[in-house]
Image: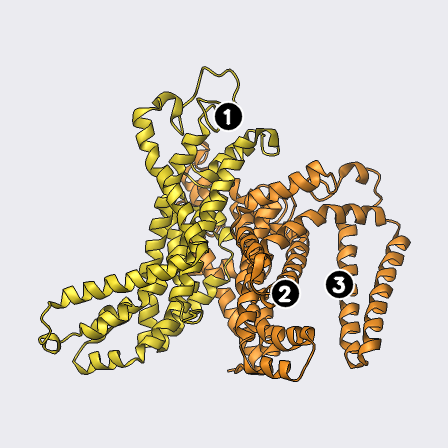
């Protein structure tokens, strides 16, 4: 684990002079070893692997879209936003060899929309998760380290955010401002970064703070900043990584709900596909299943996949649930 | 205990003011103000616009405007809704809040109970196909795209099986000849539900002292008496048909919201139960030769309940969010749908009013969960 790395590569180089390898190589080796051990643990859990497989599938979809657009698919017909197939008299048209998942009421190819949106979902999830990672780790480490007023301020804020109905808040925010994909990503990231994730990460940081290697680093003359950045935060990263997964689930779900309500300013997404269906009056028309099912199932599966990976990781990194 | 409750209430009031301040900052950060709505009128001279601004109080400094806004807010003056013109926001809220409360409360209570029982049984019968199936089903329900799930419920139960109506609050065809309004009937329904649950609670509390064999009889007897009382009351009012119509419309949204929010409780109860089952007192109970059911329900489940109650706060926010989605898919005219319509028609006073309502509901629910927790777990410090 990362913590083991730290105990060997301390702040003072004198202590490792006796070793023949340079410090960074030892660190890299230990990191590699812990990664391999954790990957083996992760592979034991079928639930996590299923999640990973689904994520990989959607990732391939996102990758394949630009290639298909450049080679096989005609831009005027298959473009997810402005394309239209004029050879078909009536839209929405059922699945056919040219349109594997049919077309939507405006004559656009559903499969192309699905693949194009996968890319933006990954973008959204990644940005939101990174924002969460940065905020939650920093705030958790700082408030655990300093305690006192900083701590109680951040914890009260986290309490407030935990009980906020986020969908409601974002619906109101979307009337007050023009929310695009990147803004939504930042909003979700900030909300989950200051919210529940902080509390868990802070409690983990509290247990790290009292370990002996922190004492040792302090005795060796490490400043507060050095202790937080070099010793506490690296040990928090596994847990933060776990919360990144849950943030991705949240971000995708929120994006889907908001664009289902037609409140986001985006060009195309799975939620928007269902919104278009509703807008054109095909919502309860299950004979035209290709208008609703592919998009809804994609949302559900990708959300579930990240959640499952999160749960599987939880059993590895969360000290409370660890079976070993 | 009392000191703890008072403290929590004061904290919540402070949080409420913080929340109001954040809402105000959000509104005030908007470019332009209400006077700008008249900008497009060419007959308005700059002087007149200034007069308009000062009449509306928009030329005052921010702090004073904030205090004025706060004052009128506390007095219940939320402004006038644009999309329901000329009805004031507070009137719209007063009409629609009970409908949301019914949905939210009944779904929360039911999902908590169902999730708790399901999680308990799941942890008890560990391993096997049942566990896998329910875990996957639970995760599926937890992460399913809620609007789609609601649509599927409509499609199965309303469209194909035709058991429940597709959406909305009442069926206008039945209500054409109705002697009273829908709200009249609905408020009486609320009253009935309140009285019935109070009586049932009393029966539960008082029957605790009775010896086990007669206890069951007393409880069932109480339930039957309450049921008969409700039936007799609604027969005497003569509007029972209309109440039944509202109930039919209510059933499917409650079912959907319950199913959406019950999975989280179930998964958590299962985890918590698994931890509790490893405790020594469970082994002691087994060694005493107590029946399995008693160990499960009285020794393990009661202690496993505590973390679940703590997480109730999360699931309450989840249920409120789910409520907005459920209401809008089912066209249920509650606060969630009102918020959504206000948001999409840029009716800012209504949207802010609905947001404040939701915030208040979340705060109150949080307070109740906290007090419940303090009552259930005597080990926590009331500091």
Q: Quick one: label 3, few (<14), some, or many (20+) residues within 10 Å?
A: few
Q: Look at the picture and state if B278 lies above or below B57.
A: below
Please report, as a chain letter, where disc 2 is located. Answer: B
- Measured from the top left, where is residue B293 in percent x and y? 69, 73
Please tell me whether mark 1 or mark 2 is closer to you in this view: 2
Please report, as a chain letter, where disc 1 is located. Answer: A
Q: Are marks 3 and 2 on the same chain?
A: yes
Q: Quick one: label 1, few (<14), some, or many (20+) residues within 10 Å?
A: some
Label 3 SS: helix
Residue beneath the point at 87% across and 58% down: B233
Question: In the drawing, what numbered circle is on residue B328?
Answer: none
Q: Look at the picture and state if B252 lies above or below B361.
A: above
- Measured from the top left, where is residue B16 in percent x and y? 51, 65
Q: Look at the picture and state if B213 lies above or below A97.
A: below
| Residue beneath disc 1 | A95
For marks 3 and 2, give the CA distance: 30 Å
For marks 3 and 1, give the CA distance: 53 Å
Label 1 SS: loop
Question: In the drawing, what numbered circle is on residue B121?
Answer: 2
Check if mark 1's residue and mark 2's residue have beta carbons within 8 Å: no
Chain drawn in orange: B
Q: Look at the picture and state if B228 lies above or below B27.
A: below
Q: Are marks 3 and 1 on the same chain?
A: no
Say whether residue B278 is left or right of residue B230: left
Please report, as a chain letter, where disc 3 is located. Answer: B
Q: Quadrant of residue A179?
A: top left
Report how many numbered discs are placed on residues in the image.
Answer: 3
Image hue for chain A = yellow
Question: In the drawing, what numbered circle is on residue B194?
Answer: 3
């Amino acid at each position: 684990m990362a913590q083991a790395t730290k105990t060997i590569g301390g702040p003072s180089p004198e202590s490792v002079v006796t070793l023949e390898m340079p410090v960074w190589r030892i660190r890299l080796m230990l990191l590699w070893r812990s990664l391999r051990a954790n990957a083996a643990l992760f592979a034991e859990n079928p639930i996590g692997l299923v999640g990973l497989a689904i994520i990989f599938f959607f990732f391939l979809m996102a990758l394949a879209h630009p290639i298909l657009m450049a080679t096989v698919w005609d831009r005027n017909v298959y473009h997810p936003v402005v394309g239209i197939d004029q050879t078909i008299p009536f839209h929405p048209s059922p699945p056919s060899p040219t349109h594997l998942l049919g077309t939507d009421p405006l004559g656009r190819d559903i499969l192309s929309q699905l693949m194009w949106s996968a890319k933006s979902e990954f973008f959204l999830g990644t940005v939101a998760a990174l924002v969460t990672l940065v905020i939650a780790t920093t705030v958790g480490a700082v408030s655990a380290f300093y305690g006192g007023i900083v701590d109680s301020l951040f914890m009260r804020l986290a309490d407030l955010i935990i009980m906020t109905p986020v969908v409601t808040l974002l619906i109101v925010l979307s009337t007050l401002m023009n929310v695009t994909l990147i803004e939504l990503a930042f909003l979700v990231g900030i909300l989950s970064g200051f919210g529940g994730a902080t509390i868990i990460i802070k409690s983990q940081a509290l247990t790290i703070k009292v370990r002996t290697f922190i004492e040792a680093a302090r005795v060796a003359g490490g400043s507060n900043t050095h202790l937080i950045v070099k010793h506490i935060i690296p040990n928090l990263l596994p847990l933060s990584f776990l919360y990144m997964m849950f943030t991705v689930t949240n971000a995708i779900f929120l994006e889907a709900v908001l664009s289902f309500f037609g409140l986001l300013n985006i060009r195309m997404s799975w939620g928007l596909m269902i919104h278009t269906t509703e807008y054109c009056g095909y919502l309860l028309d299950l004979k035209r299943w290709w208008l609703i099912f592919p998009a809804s199932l994609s949302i559900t599966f990708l959300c579930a996949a990240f959640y499952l990976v999160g749960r599987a990781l939880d059993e590895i990194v969360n000290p409370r649930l660890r079976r070993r | 205990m009392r000191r703890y409750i008072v403290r929590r209430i004061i904290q919540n009031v402070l949080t409420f003011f913080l929340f109001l301040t954040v809402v105000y900052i959000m509104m005030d950060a908007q470019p332009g103000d209400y006077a700008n709505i008249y900008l497009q009128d060419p007959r308005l001279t700059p002087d007149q616009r200034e007069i308009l601004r000062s009449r509306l109080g928009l030329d005052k400094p921010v702090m004073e405007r904030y205090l004025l806004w706060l004052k009128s807010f506390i007095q219940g003056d939320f402004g006038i809704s644009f999309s329901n013109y000329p009805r004031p926001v507070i009137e719209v809220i007063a009409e629609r809040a009970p409908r949301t409360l019914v949905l939210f409360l009944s779904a929360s209570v039911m999902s908590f109970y169902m999730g708790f029982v399901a999680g308990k049984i799941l942890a008890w019968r560990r391993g096997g196909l049942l566990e896998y199936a329910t875990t996957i089903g639970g995760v599926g329900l937890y992460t399913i795209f809620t609007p789609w799930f609601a649509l599927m419920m409509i499609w199965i139960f309303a469209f194909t099986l035709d058991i429940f109506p597709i959406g909305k609050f009442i069926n206008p065809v039945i209500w054409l000849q109705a002697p009273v309004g829908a709200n009249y009937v609905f408020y009486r329904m609320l009253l009935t539900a309140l009285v019935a649950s109070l009586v049932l609670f009393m029966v539960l509390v008082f029957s605790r002292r009775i010896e086990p064999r007669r206890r069951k009889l007393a409880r069932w007897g109480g339930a039957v008496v309450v049921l008969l009382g409700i039936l007799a009351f609604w027969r005497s009012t003569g509007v029972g048909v209309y109440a039944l119509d509202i109930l039919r419309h209510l059933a499917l949204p409650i079912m959907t919201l319950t199913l959406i929010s019950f999975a989280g409780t179930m998964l958590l109860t299962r985890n918590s139960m698994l931890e509790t089952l490893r405790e020594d007192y469970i082994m002691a109970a087994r060694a005493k030769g107590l029946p399995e059911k008693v160990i499960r329900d009285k020794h393990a489940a009661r202690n496993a309940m505590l973390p679940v109650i703590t997480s109730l706060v999360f699931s309450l926010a989840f249920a409120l969010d789910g409520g907005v989605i459920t209401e809008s898919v089912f066209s249920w005219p509650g606060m969630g749908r009102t918020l959504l319509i206000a948001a999409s028609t840029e009716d800012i006073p209504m949207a802010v009013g609905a947001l404040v309502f939701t915030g208040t509901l979340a705060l109150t629910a949080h307070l109740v969960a906290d007090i419940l927790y303090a009552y259930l777990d005597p080990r926590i410090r009331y500091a």
